Image (cartoon, rainbow, N blue to C red):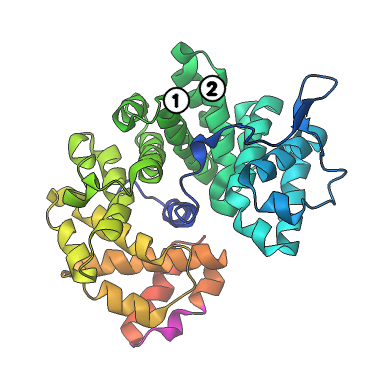
Amino acid sequence: MSMRKTSVAVLVVLSVMLAFVGILARGGESGGVDLRVDAVGQPVLAVAPLDEEALPGDGCIAETTCLRQWYQALTWRIGPEKALAALDAHSRRNEKLAAACHDTTHAVGEVAAYLRSLSEAMSLGDTNCGSGYYHGVVATTTTTVDPEQLIPVLVAGCSDGAGFSRWECFHGVGHGFVFAAGGDIMMGVEKCLTITTDSDRGACGSGAFMQELADNGQDPSYAEDPYRVCRNVSEQVVAGQCYDMMANIIRIHVKNGAAAEFAVCRTVESQYEVDCYEGLGRARFAGMPFEGPGIEEYCSQAGSAIGTTRCYEAAFANTAAYYGDSEEAKSHCPELSTEGLRNRCAEYLTKNPL
């Protein structure tokens, strides 16, 4: 793996979140839902959840704004810890609610940012639902802090964490920087570049480019050069994140099959070629169960040994993300067609546990 990815968790969270990306900037718009203010000035639904056992009705679940406000009201009432647990329980009872859980956990995180310090709020989350809770916490923090103090406040708050939670916190900061810059990706990246630690800076960059992907990934201007943004980033750690994340744009705009997608990787600067291969493998198999024949068919078209290897590793990591457990993921390695691939799969998942 490249220097900016020291654990499979980094690749895993990117894989999961892409299934839900693009929700960050919707904020607290009312969308016609009847709101009121409670006794202490907190906005709540006119028909708020009665208790933590109550599920929203089908009409509310189908309406993003209503669903967000339902769980925000619940979070004000019972706190983010209990609200997250309630949402998890509710999602197991309703498939449509489960499918909307990224945006809903995002809404819980937005309220948690008011109820807890940044480090305390971040410590409550996990990677469920594409890490939407983390994103909500940080996005709200970017709107409540003096712009002159935003960077030191966020960096200090995220620096209280360690390991994957710290990476996830700085990833959310990247989303927040772009959001605070009104969608200007390069302005958001410039803020990420002020972070001194390589891993923290890279995590911030990954969030910034994910936000650009969400906001503008379908823009036809990307068809001519999927990496046009990345080519404007000279700092190596953040640029590597860009070439990984924006590989999703290759899959959106390149329509001539896998070989043509991988061919784009050979047009970038050599130090970023592996990031492109990894990004394509992650994008192709994000949010999917193990698909042995599909993995072999896609990755075999990478056109180079290193490209094939990086593609396989991304696919194996995605499997761990899908099942939420590296051991369960390893149980699917025998579905690959050769002993060499089966051993490679098991070895990778052993060395990079989720």
Q: Which residue is mark 2?
A: 143
Q: Nearer the viewer, residue 33 or 285?
A: 33
| Residue 142 vertical placement versus 86 (above, below) | above
Residue 102 image offset from top left, x and y in percent = 58, 49
Q: Distance of mark 2 from mark 1, alpha carbons?
A: 7 Å
- Residue 341 in magenta? no
User: In this rendering, is residue 224 above or below 292?
Assistant: above
How many marks the image carries: the answer is 2
Label 1, secondary structure: give it.
helix
Q: Which residue is mark 1?
A: 180
Name which residue type carries label 2.
Thr
Determine if residue 160 is in view.
no
Residue plotted at (16% across, 50% down): 224
Q: Earlier in the sequence, mark 2 or mark 1?
A: 2
In terms of depth relative to the viewer, which is nearer, 77 or 67?
67
Camera-side residue of 6 and 250: 250
The reply to whether callout 2 and callout 1 are in contact (CB within 8 Å) is yes
**Side (left or right) of 253 relative to 79:** left
Span colored in magenta = 331-337
Q: Position of residue 203 (x, y in %)?
A: 40, 40
